[in-house]
Amino acid sequence: MERIIQITAGRGPAECTWVVAQVLKKVLEEAQDQNLETVLLQRESGQENGTIETASISVKGKNTDSFVNSWIGTIQWIGQSQFRKMHKRKNWFIGIFEIQAQKNTSVSENDIQYQAMRSSGAGGQHVNKVSSAIRATHTPTGIAVVAMDSRSQHQNKKLATERLLKKLEDEKLVHLKNHVGKQWENQLNIERGNPVRVFTGSDFKKNKVEKSYKGIRQKLKNDLRNENN
């Protein structure tokens, strides 16, 4: 199970980008405590040192769903601005949203086509007579690379495969980044109120949720009274 979340300051000021940086640390620390695998897929730095506009994280492992669900929503920080000491505002909000994971694009050997070709450039008579260079093409996407580093066709085939896989991985990351970019509208939809987590102070401590059991006790009393009647 893999789920991807985006932590964003939306169109918020520098204070919100500071909150994003702090929340990112908290998410990664909590995921580590729960033995979850995380990969930072994308991060856009804010204008101030140590701040982040937006970050996307892949989360994998047991209990991924409960972990991610506990973070999705509005995050509130209550504290004095780090950048505007005289600013009166004390409440700052950021958002955490889910991004749909991309389809698995694992590469099959059957998807790679190899073509022998003559090497070009310096190298003496050998490269002119022997087709030692290899072009590797990923047929589903048309992405191709060429390897002509070695006089060995077998070695060039190995190099071409490695380069093609690397290029496909780079393309996947670019595609993901573009996909994240399309989620930018999330940054305009951060809801104030009903935060899923609240942090306070410059040390960014999590607020304890004060639970009131008065209503629960009263309900139990009423249920017992009804049963006895």
Image (cartoon, helix red, strand yellow):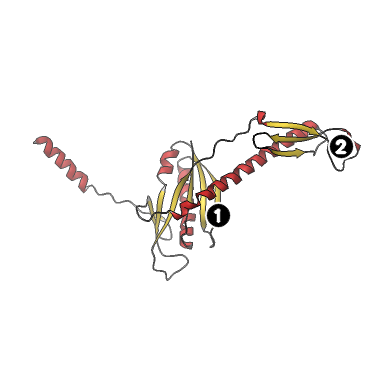
The circle drawn on residue 44 is: 1
Amino acid type shown at disc 2: Val
**Up-down: is 195 above or below 225?**
below
Residue linked to disc 2: 127
Given residues 155 and 33, the one toward you in this image is: 155
| Residue that extends furthest to the top in the rendered view of this protein | 110
Q: Residue at x 88, y 33 (%)?
A: 129
Q: Residues within 10 Å of mark 2 (few under 14, many from 20)?
A: some
Per the model, the C-alpha gap separating discs 2 and 1 is 46 Å
Residue 224 image position (x, y, % from top left) = 14, 38
200 sits left or right of 147 in the view:
left
Residue 4 image position (x, y, % from top left) = 49, 43
Given residues 221 and 74, the one toward you in this image is: 74
Q: Residue at x 48, y 62 (%)?
A: 14
Query: Which of the image's four quarters has the C terminus?
Result: top left
Q: Residue at x 63, y 41 (%)?
A: 169
